[in-house]
Image: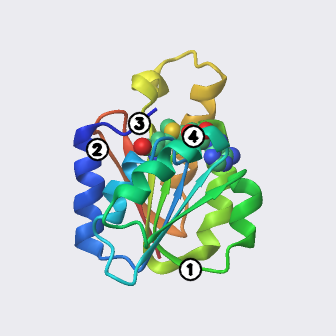
Amino acid sequence: MISGHVQGQLLSTISHMLKPERILEIGTFTGYASLCLASGLPSKGKLITIEVKPELAAISQKYFDRSAHKENIHALIGDAKTIIPELDESFDLVFIDANKKENDIIYELVLPKIKSGGFILVDNVLWSGKVVDQIKDHDTRAIDTFNKKLKDDSRIECMILPLRDGLTLARKL
Ligand SMILES: C[S@@+](CC[C@H](N)C(=O)[O-])C[C@H]1O[C@@H](n2cnc3c(N)ncnc32)[C@H](O)[C@@H]1O
């Protein structure tokens, strides 16, 4: 579930490069990627992370409270599909890493809230390489369909970084 160390380092590097004022993460889990992303925030920056399972949000909050970025991290508990439309923010960087079958729904909800020139990251887009299998299971088909949609989406420019389980890096035009 968790972003490994190499991907964590990449998320941290991207965040330091962009110095985003506003970051949104969908799928907190234990908060590792949240902390990597938060490391590049300017002092008044803000990272909102959404987790549907309260028991996981309790774990991540313990780590956030211990971190140097605790004032900058706002952890929300609930279904991202309900929470995102209620967010009155626009984001410089969004990391989609929740239920892979819902990538497309989440993407369509967040895209209007991303600034022009802002970035979207999507995790696990290679799905252990299964996206190139001839016969795909339901999850793999959903990921493959989403990847192909992004490739042809004129609202963004995107590429897949073949790092770990595949990370899409897209820029909103
Ligand atoms: C792959 S883990 C996230 C890992 C984390 N981003 C990291 O790299 O450290 C996915 C998380 O998304 C959560 N999740 C799944 N569907 C969700 C939804 N609709 N809204 C919010 N969180 C969701 C799961 O409970 C799980 O904790």
Q: Is mark 1 within 8 Å of ligand 1?
A: no
Comparing labels 4 and 2, the label whose residue is closer to the camera: 4
Q: Is mark 4 within 8 Å of ligand 1?
A: yes
Label 2 packing within 10 angstroms: few (<14), some (14-19), many (20+): some
Comparing labels 1 and 3, the label whose residue is closer to the camera: 3
Judge from the rendering whether residue 133 lies leftward or rightward of residue 52; answer left or right: left
> Which residue position is annotated with label 2?
7
Judge from the rendering whether residue 168 lies leftward or rightward of residue 13; answer left or right: right
Q: Which badge, 3 or 4, is on the more N-terminal residue? A: 3
Q: Secondary structure at mark 4?
A: helix
Residue 56 image label: 4
The amino acid marked with disc number 3 is Ile
Label 4 packing within 10 angstroms: few (<14), some (14-19), many (20+): some
Tell me the residue at 36%/64% (across/down). Answer: 38
Tell me the residue at 74%/71% (across/down). Answer: 86
Q: CA distance from mark 3 to mark 4?
A: 12 Å
Q: Which badge, 1 or 4, is on the more N-terminal residue? A: 4
Q: Is 80 drawn above or below residue 154 in the view shown? A: above
Residue 109 occupies quadrant: bottom right
> Which residue position is annotated with label 3?
2
Comparing labels 3 and 2, the label whose residue is closer to the camera: 3
Q: Is 140 drawn above or below residue 51 in the view shown? A: above
Comparing labels 3 and 4, the label whose residue is closer to the camera: 4
Tell me the residue at 48%/19% (across/down). Answer: 133
The amino acid marked with disc number 2 is Gln
> Which residue position is annotated with label 1?
90
The amino acid marked with disc number 4 is Leu
